Image (cartoon, rainbow, N blue to C red):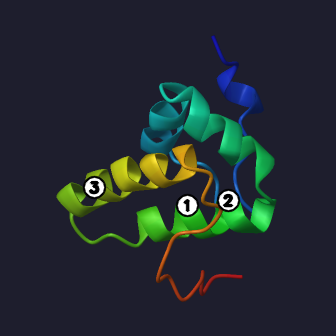
Amino acid sequence: MTDLRNIPGGVVHELPDDLLQALTHDAEALRTWEDITPLARNEWICWVESAKKDETRRKRIDWGCSNLREGKRRPCCWPGCPHR
């Protein structure tokens, strides 16, 4: 089992619990997550957190894990985190 305390967040954003749980249940997505830069992780987190509806947030987490599983390092079509 993965030690949840050792899964890194982003530059500005902390790793939210729902994304953390999804990553801990997807070893391939987690492997990419741990390999990308803190700035790239920040982009994924901000993209998930920018969803206005819970349903959209869940879809983004599922889609994000799928993309991370495929080795994609950034969310597609995302202009970037405005908080950095």
- In depth, the one of 77 and 17 nearer the eye is 77
- On the image, which quarter does residue 45 sit in? bottom right
Q: Is residue 29 above or below residue 71?
A: above
Q: Which residue is mark 1?
A: 45
**In which quadrant is the N terminus drawn?**
top right
Q: Position of residue 6 (x, y in %)?
A: 77, 30
Q: Is label 1 in a helix, a strand or a loop?
A: helix
Q: Position of residue 58 (x, y in %)?
A: 29, 51
Asked whether residue 12 is in view, the answer is no
**In the rendered structure, which amino acid carries the disc numbered 1?**
Ile
Q: Is residue 81 above or below residue 63?
A: below
Name the residue rendered at 71%, 59% in the picture: 10
**Residue, far top:** 1
Q: Position of residue 44 (x, y in %)?
A: 56, 63
Q: Are marks 1 and 2 in contact (CB under 8 Å)?
A: yes
**In the rendered structure, which amino acid carries the disc numbered 2?**
Arg
Asked whether residue 55 is in view, the answer is yes
Q: Which residue is mark 2?
A: 41
Q: Is label 3 in a helix, a strand or a loop?
A: helix
- In depth, the one of 37 and 6 nearer the eye is 37
Q: Earlier in the sequence, mark 1 or mark 3?
A: 1
As measured in the structure, the alpha-carbon distance from the residue carrying label 1 to the one carrying label 3 is: 13 Å
Within 10 Å of disc 2 (Cα), the crowding (few <14, some 14-19, many 20+) is: many
Name the residue rendered at 21%, 65% in the picture: 53
Q: Position of residue 47 (x, y in %)?
A: 48, 70
Q: Are marks 1 and 3 in contact (CB under 8 Å)?
A: no
As measured in the structure, the alpha-carbon distance from the residue carrying label 1 to the one carrying label 2 is: 6 Å
Q: Earlier in the sequence, mark 3 or mark 2?
A: 2
As measured in the structure, the alpha-carbon distance from the residue carrying label 3 to the one carrying label 2 is: 18 Å
